Image (tube, grey):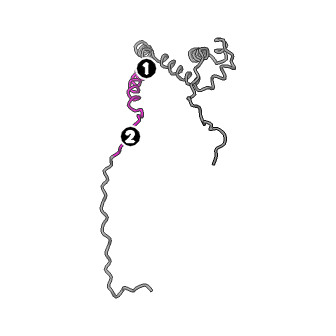
């Protein structure tokens, strides 16, 4: 059977390259995370149109950058938690706040250790079960006299 036309590739020969975020979009996202500004005011303060920022906020590379910036900001903000709790423990006049600070400090130490060891890790789990089977008792033998035996008809 003859083939008509030319062969057409079903996909690109080269993988599509991920689009990089422009520096202006990065600055807007950083301002949104660090100052709590909404995207319209952050876009205007960085010289971008709000509509441009609205289009970028729906893209995967922008969402990934936003998540990374939020994680970085959380780590930065939480860096002094232990120091502030220790200061409350040592200098607070309210005894309840001192007790709570001590309790929180102790839980922080426990949760740091527990996070690493309780996290699921990839791999294979092999369970070896020792199964002992109980032998079945032999079937019951019924003794019946031959006179009571009647064949089926």
Q: Residue furthest front?
A: 2
Q: Nearer the viewer, residue 28 or 119?
A: 28
Q: In the rendered image, which quarter is residue 133 located in?
A: bottom left
Q: What whole-number distance in Å separates the C-alpha atoms at marks 1 and 2?
A: 41 Å
> Is residue 74 found left or right of 118 in the rendered image?
right
Magenta stretch: give its range.
100-127
Q: Which residue is mark 2?
A: 124
Q: Position of residue 51 (x, y in %)?
A: 69, 20
- Give the crowd class for mark 1: few <14, some 14-19, many >=20 residues within 10 Å: many
Q: Secondary structure at mark 2?
A: loop
Q: Secondary structure at mark 1?
A: helix
Q: In the rendered image, which quarter is residue 55 located in?
A: top right
Residue for point 61% across, 26% down: 59
Residue for point 64% across, 46% down: 2
Q: Earlier in the sequence, mark 1 or mark 2?
A: 1
Q: Which residue is mark 1?
A: 101
Residue contact at pointers 1 and 2, CB within 8 angstroms: no
Q: Is residue 11 above or below residue 79?
A: below
Looking at the image, is mark 1 or mark 2 nearer the viewer? 2
> Is residue 75 found left or right of 138 in the rendered image?
right
């Amino acid at each position: 059977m003859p083939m008509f036309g030319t062969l057409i590739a079903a996909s690109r020969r080269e993988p599509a390259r991920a689009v990089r975020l422009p520096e202006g979009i990065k600055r807007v996202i950083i301002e949104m995370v660090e100052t709590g500004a909404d995207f319209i005011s952050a876009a205007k303060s960085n010289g971008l149109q709000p509509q441009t920022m609205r289009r970028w906020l729906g893209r995967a590379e922008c969402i990934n950058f936003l998540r990374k910036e939020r994680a970085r900001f959380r780590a930065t903000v939480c860096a002094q938690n232990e120091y502030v709790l220790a200061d409350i423990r040592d200098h607070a006049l309210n005894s309840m706040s001192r007790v709570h600070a001590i309790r929180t400090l102790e839980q922080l130490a426990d949760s740091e250790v527990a996070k690493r060891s309780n996290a699921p890790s990839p791999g294979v789990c092999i369970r070896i079960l020792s199964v002992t089977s109980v032998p079945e008792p032999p079937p019951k033998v019924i003794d019946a006299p031959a006179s009571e035996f009647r064949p089926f008809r």
